[in-house]
Amino acid sequence: IRNAVETYEPKLMKNECCGKEMAVIKDKETFEFSYEDRKCQITVTNVPKWRCEHCGEIESALSLIAAIEKVVEQEFESMLSESQVPDSITMDFNEMLQIKEPQQV
């Protein structure tokens, strides 16, 4: 999964809506995790998406969102194992592209 995020190029393919090409924008995705009686909200900023300039419709690349969710889930599990889970955290998509998968021994 990290490979999908690492190999992702932040340039989305063209997408159309209302008969016109959609603009590529940077937006955020928020994921919520529950543990014990608490919740942790992790927001990823600068996620590339498409927006229709005519109607305002926003679309995401589902495979990218799924890959981001897996990385975020791994980050949450890491914080949980270290008993250091804040109520919220913000991660930057561009920085996620720099994260290397941990080496397995």
Image (cartoon, rainbow, N blue to C red):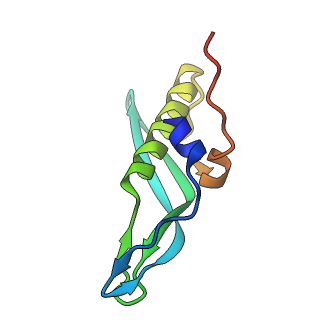
Name the quadrant containing residue 58: bottom left
Residue 98 percent coordinates (x, y): 69, 43
Residue 54 seen? yes
Residue 88 at least partly seen: no
88 sits to left or right of 97: left
How far from the left and from the top, in percent, is residue 85? 55, 33
Above or below — where is 96 with respect to 17? above
Q: Nearer the viewer, residue 40 or 92?
A: 92
The residue under the point 45% across, 37% down is 70
Q: Nearer the viewer, residue 38 or 105?
A: 105
Outermost residue to the bottom = 54
| Identity of the residue drawn at 55% across and 37% down | 3
Residue 66 pos. (x, y %): 40, 45
The furthest residue to the left: 18
Q: Is residue 57 above or below residue 62?
A: below
In percent of width and height, residue 103 lies at 65, 19
Tally the numbered discs.
0
At x 51%, y 33%, the residue is 76
The answer to whether 4 is drawn above or below residue 90 in the figure is above
Residue at x 37%, y 90% (from the top left corner): 54
The residue most toward the front is 13
Task: Tell which residue pokes out farthest to the top in this image.
Answer: 105
Q: Is residue 28 above or below residue 81?
A: below
